[in-house]
Image: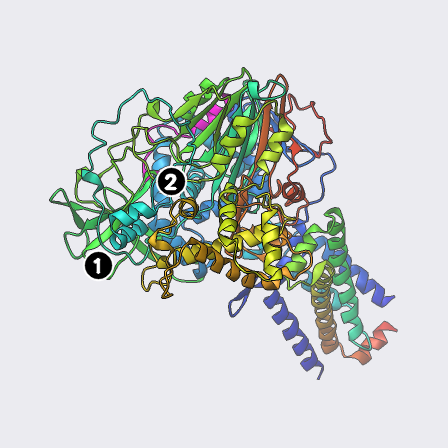
């Protein structure tokens, strides 16, 4: 539940802020949301951010790609060493996923630095 | 520990964010900021143009006098309906920018020598050359004339306003893809930029000359051999204006005087400017009703240019209550270049006369501030050029302008002398030259079109015309200099008034032919006239397409649009027709192996067509090239003299049939003396050896041998077309030609218009209406172009006159 809420909130906030701010708003959003979440393994926070960012970018890109009948993605795939349109979609997902995941991880880690896990567990339970 | 983990994560996140937000350079490779580029909200994904589904849009275009409407047909051709010419041009500016913004911007930037400003030091030399060549200067001269015409400027500014209105409502996420990749943005348009784009056209079409090569060759060979190898007139040629035309004016006062045309001796090792491509040309013709099946005149035109993507041409219809016209325009230039209206159709080909001459000046002082002219010191004008360079220091260059034109190069070997460039495109037009384009839009007859065309300045064009009343005509449109005999064929002494051009040929003395008895007019970049024309001219002329056109059109009767299509896409070559039988004749009797006999059979059965599914064209081309090199071995491999003339193809063919005893047949590298048969046989064996690896391949024909891609203006391979195999040959009407490994020239727009009671028009160009490599309309006409098919052009009478699915409608209000 915790994981899912971080994923959802990160994704929705990122989506709305992306309409007005440059791409790195994604990282900022993931970081700020990450501040509110702490897991036994911080990797979970990374994963929540990764999925939120990756799905947001690739989902929107897929929609644009569909309207365009894949013409642009094919060209861009050729431009980037022939990775193809699937490669371009994966690259889009990875850039957003990794950066969003890193943002979320950094947020979570900062929280753990300020509130060590023991206290946190007490608060959470 | 926790702090450390956090610190590492923070550094990693921050570092990667920074890396992805900035353009990066690895050695030669430059990468745009990947985060921005891949962000689907603002980056390249935003350029994934959807296929329009009949949407309607409303735009504001300040300055419109009345609302206007644009209807896009199935091929995304805009049909503009406006209240008057001014409004139509404003909307045209908006629409062209919407589809071709980066293309028009980069063309103007390149002409202005301002590429480095956005692309960095890599393009510095191109920028310097454009400025040395005086392209920005030439554009400013043209603009100065334009500014004297209130009405003209109003129209040009309307077009600019249209472009700029589009730019204003454009946010960075909507910038064309190329901007995002190269990391810069568009700039406001202005009439100066329109002038710059027109100067690009002039530089492409009328900046070709061989002055230095001819001077070197004359020096090397002597007059007699020079005239033998490089005759000015091809006796078999049929000129643009039919031979035997009577000129009702004498030669200009003293054009027989040769005082100004003294060729200069001296040897030149390098050219001041690189040469424009040799293989640019075009075909146009008009048939009178007496020759057509329907009794209606037909006009055809296919300009051959370097093929690039985005396509050179943009198709558009302009409709107002006063006129209705359809055709193609150059992105950045208002109105139409080639097209038709409800009364007249017009098509253009390049004239090819030489209007760029080099004059040798003698400096009066070491600092080169003055040169001797008629014995007196005449000061030069200095023009300061400031080239801004992205990521590097600004570069300053001072160009000296003389009475002749700019000094375009430095020559440390000869500090006392320089060559000055005399180019007609530098001159201020005497009137508002774009008026020709505006008058053509509205012309009601062949006669009115001719009157309007007299405004045109440069490059000079062979303009073919046909109107609905049944008149046809061909006229040289533009201005040309009065030259003395051989003036401008060689480098000349620029010592005084006597060496200047004497002026311009009066418009009433420009060659033209109206309604000839033959029932047709045609041009294909061959010589303008026969030698009886009172004015001297030299230049670059085609020797085969014009002859073929004149031969076929003189025989033709009861033809229709279909016949014209097969003519425009014909791969037949007179060069092969004349050379090959003679070559085979000379080969006969030679002992050949089975494979070589097979090659002879293929060649003997050939119909001289460079069709994609034939093998013979590969054999012929290679055999011919070997023959050319073996015959003219005298011209190859000489040390230190790359700048010489090489005999023309037609002269080489003539050598085969008419000059069997010439000393040139001898191969200097062998002890024996060769005759034509020996050279032809040696060349054949070389060809057979050379082509061995190819001929074993299954399914390898001219199409495969002659395959190419059309490249993007930026030369990014990812944005090039797929591989095309259309056939064609530089000497065939379908003049598709590979120049080197990457460049290709050929028919950039094929148009056929039947001027009957109902106008029927057909066209196709190698590309698409959109300049966006990510649009389905970027190269959607390639298949049809390759196969020689055409689209019926939708010449609409009103916004509701839609015979096709409407892709999109746009309304414009003030």
Disc with the residue nearer the chain's start (2 vs 1) = 2
Front residue of this view, candidates B114 and B133: B133
Q: Residue furthest front?
A: B589
Query: Is label 2 or label 1 in front?
Result: 1
Q: Which numbered circle lies on residue B414?
A: 1
In the image: residue B767, left or right of residue B147:
right
Vertical order, B285 against B289 (above or below): below
Image quadrant occupied by the N terminus of chain B: bottom right
Specify start and end residues of the magenta stretch as a single range: B425-444
Residue B481 placement (x, y as % from top left): 30, 34
Residue B714 in view in this figure: no
Q: Secondary structure at mark 2?
A: helix
CA gap between label 2 and label 1 equals 31 Å
The residue wearing badge 2 is B139
In the image: residue B273, left or right of residue B814:
left
How crowded pointer 1 is (Cα within 10 Å; few <14, some 14-19, many 20+) is rated as few
Which residue shows up at 59% across the image and 67% down it? B18
Vertical order, A102 against B83 (above or below): below
Front residue of this view, candidates B693 and A108: B693
Residue B45 in view in this figure: yes
- Could you confirm whether marks 2 and 1 are on the same chain? yes
Which picture quadrant has residue B148?
top left
Residue A31 placement (x, y as % from top left): 71, 67
Question: Which chain hosts label 1?
Answer: B
Vertical order, B287 against B628 (above or below): above
Front residue of this view, candidates A40 and B199: B199
Q: Secondary structure at mark 1?
A: loop
Residue B668 placement (x, y as % from top left): 35, 62
Residue B758 placement (x, y as % from top left): 64, 19
Front residue of this view, candidates B20 and B270: B270
């Amino acid at each position: 539940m915790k994981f899912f809420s971080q994923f959802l909130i990160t994704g929705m906030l990122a989506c709305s802020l992306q309409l007005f701010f440059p791409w790195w708003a994604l990282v900022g959003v993931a970081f700020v949301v990450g501040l509110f979440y702490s897991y036994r393994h911080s990797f979970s926070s990374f994963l929540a951010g990764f999925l939120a960012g990756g799905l947001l970018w690739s989902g929107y890109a897929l929609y644009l790609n569909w309207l365009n009948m894949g013409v642009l993605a094919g060209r861009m795939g050729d431009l980037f060493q022939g990775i193809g349109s699937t490669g371009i979609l994966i690259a889009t997902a990875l850039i957003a996923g990794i950066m969003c995941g890193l943002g979320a991880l950094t947020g979570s880690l900062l929280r753990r630095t300020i509130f060590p896990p023991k206290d946190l567990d007490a608060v959470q339970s | 520990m926790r702090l450390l983990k956090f610190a590492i994560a923070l550094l990693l996140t921050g570092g990667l964010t920074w890396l992805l937000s900035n353009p990066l350079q690895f050695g030669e490779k430059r990468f745009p900021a990947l985060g921005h580029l891949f962000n689907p909200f603002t980056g390249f994904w935003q350029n994934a143009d959807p296929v329009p589904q009949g949407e309607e849009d409303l735009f504001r275009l300040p300055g419109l006098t009345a609302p206007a409407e644009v209807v896009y047909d199935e091929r995304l051709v805009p049909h503009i309906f406006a209240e008057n010419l001014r409004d139509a041009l404003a909307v045209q500016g908006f629409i062209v920018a919407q589809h071709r913004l980066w293309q028009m911007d980069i063309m103007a930037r390149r002409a202005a020598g301002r590429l480095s400003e956005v692309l960095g030091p890599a393009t510095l030399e191109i920028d310097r050359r454009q400025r040395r060549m005086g392209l920005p200067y030439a554009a400013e001269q043209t603009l100065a004339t334009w500014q004297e015409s209130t009405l003209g400027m109003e129209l040009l500014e309307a077009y600019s306003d249209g472009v700029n209105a589009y730019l204003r409502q454009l946010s960075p996420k909507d910038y064309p893809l190329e901007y995002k990749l190269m990391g810069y943005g568009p700039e406001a348009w202005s009439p100066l930029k329109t002038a710059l784009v027109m100067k690009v056209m002039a530089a492409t079409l009328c900046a070709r000359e061989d002055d230095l090569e001819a001077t070197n060759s004359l020096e090397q060979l002597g007059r007699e051999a020079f005239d033998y190898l490089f005759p000015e007139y091809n006796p078999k040629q049929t000129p643009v204006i039919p031979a035997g035309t009577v000129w009702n004016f004498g030669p200009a006062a003293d054009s027989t005087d040769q005082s100004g045309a003294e060729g200069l001796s001296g040897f030149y090792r390098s050219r001041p400017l690189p040469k424009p491509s040799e293989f640019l040309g075009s075909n146009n013709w008009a048939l009178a009703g007496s020759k057509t099946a329907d009794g209606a005149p037909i006009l055809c035109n296919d300009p051959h240019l370097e093929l690039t993507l985005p396509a050179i041409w943009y198709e558009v219809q302009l409709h107002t209550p006063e006129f209705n016209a359809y055709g193609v325009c150059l992105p950045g230039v208002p109105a139409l270049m080639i097209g038709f209206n409800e009364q007249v159709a017009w098509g253009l080909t390049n004239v090819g006369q030489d209007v760029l001459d080099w004059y040798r000046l003698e400096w009066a002082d070491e600092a080169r501030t003055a040169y001797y002219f008629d014995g007196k010191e005449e000061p030069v004008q200095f023009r300061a050029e400031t080239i801004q360079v992205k990521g590097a220091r600004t570069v300053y260059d001072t160009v000296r302008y003389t009475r002749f034109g700019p000094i375009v190069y430095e020559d440390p070997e000869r500090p006392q002398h320089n060559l000055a460039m005399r180019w007609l495109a530098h001159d201020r037009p005497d009137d508002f030259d774009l008026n020709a384009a505006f008058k053509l839009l509205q012309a009601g007859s062949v006669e009115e079109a001719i009157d309007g065309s007299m405004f045109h300045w440069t490059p000079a064009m062979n303009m073919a015309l046909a109107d609905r009343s049944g008149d046809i005509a061909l006229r040289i449109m533009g201005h040309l200099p009065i030259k003395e005999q051989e003036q401008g064929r060689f480098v000349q002494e620029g010592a005084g008034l006597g060496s200047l051009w004497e002026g311009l040929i009066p418009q009433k003395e420009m060659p033209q032919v109206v309604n000839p008895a033959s029932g047709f007019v045609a041009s294909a970049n061959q010589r303008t006239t026969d030698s009886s024309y009172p004015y001297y001219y030299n230049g670059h002329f085609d020797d085969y397409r014009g002859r073929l056109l004149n031969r076929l059109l003189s025989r033709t009767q009861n033809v229709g649009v279909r016949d014209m299509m097969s003519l425009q896409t014909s791969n037949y070559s007179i060069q092969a027709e004349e050379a090959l039988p003679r070559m085979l004749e000379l080969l006969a009797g030679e002992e050949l192996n089975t494979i070589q006999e097979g090659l002879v059979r293929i060649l003997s059965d050939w119909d001289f067509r460079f069709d994609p599914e034939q093998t013979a064209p590969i054999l012929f081309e290679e055999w011919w090239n070997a023959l050319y090199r073996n015959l003219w071995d005298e011209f190859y491999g000489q040390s230190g003299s790359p700048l010489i003339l090489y005999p023309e193809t037609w002269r080489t063919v003539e050598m085969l049939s008419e000059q069997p005893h010439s000393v040139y047949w001898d191969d200097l590298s062998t002890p024996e003396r060769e005759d034509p048969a020996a050279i032809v046989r040696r060349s054949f064996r070389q060809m057979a050896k050379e082509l061995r690896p190819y001929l074993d391949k299954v399914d390898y024909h001219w199409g495969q041998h002659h395959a190419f891609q059309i490249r993007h203006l930026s030369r990014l391979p990812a944005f090039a077309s797929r591989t095309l195999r259309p056939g064609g040959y530089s000497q065939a009407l379908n003049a598709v030609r590979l120049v080197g490994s990457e460049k290709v020239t050929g028919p950039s727009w094929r148009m056929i218009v039947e001027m009957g009671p109902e106008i029927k028009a057909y066209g196709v160009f190698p590309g698409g209406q959109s300049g966006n490599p990510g649009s389905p309309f970027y190269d959607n006409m390639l298949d049809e172009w390759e196969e020689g098919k055409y689209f019926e052009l939708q010449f609409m009478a009103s916004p509701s006159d839609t015979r096709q699915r409407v892709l999109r409608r746009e309304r414009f209000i003030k």
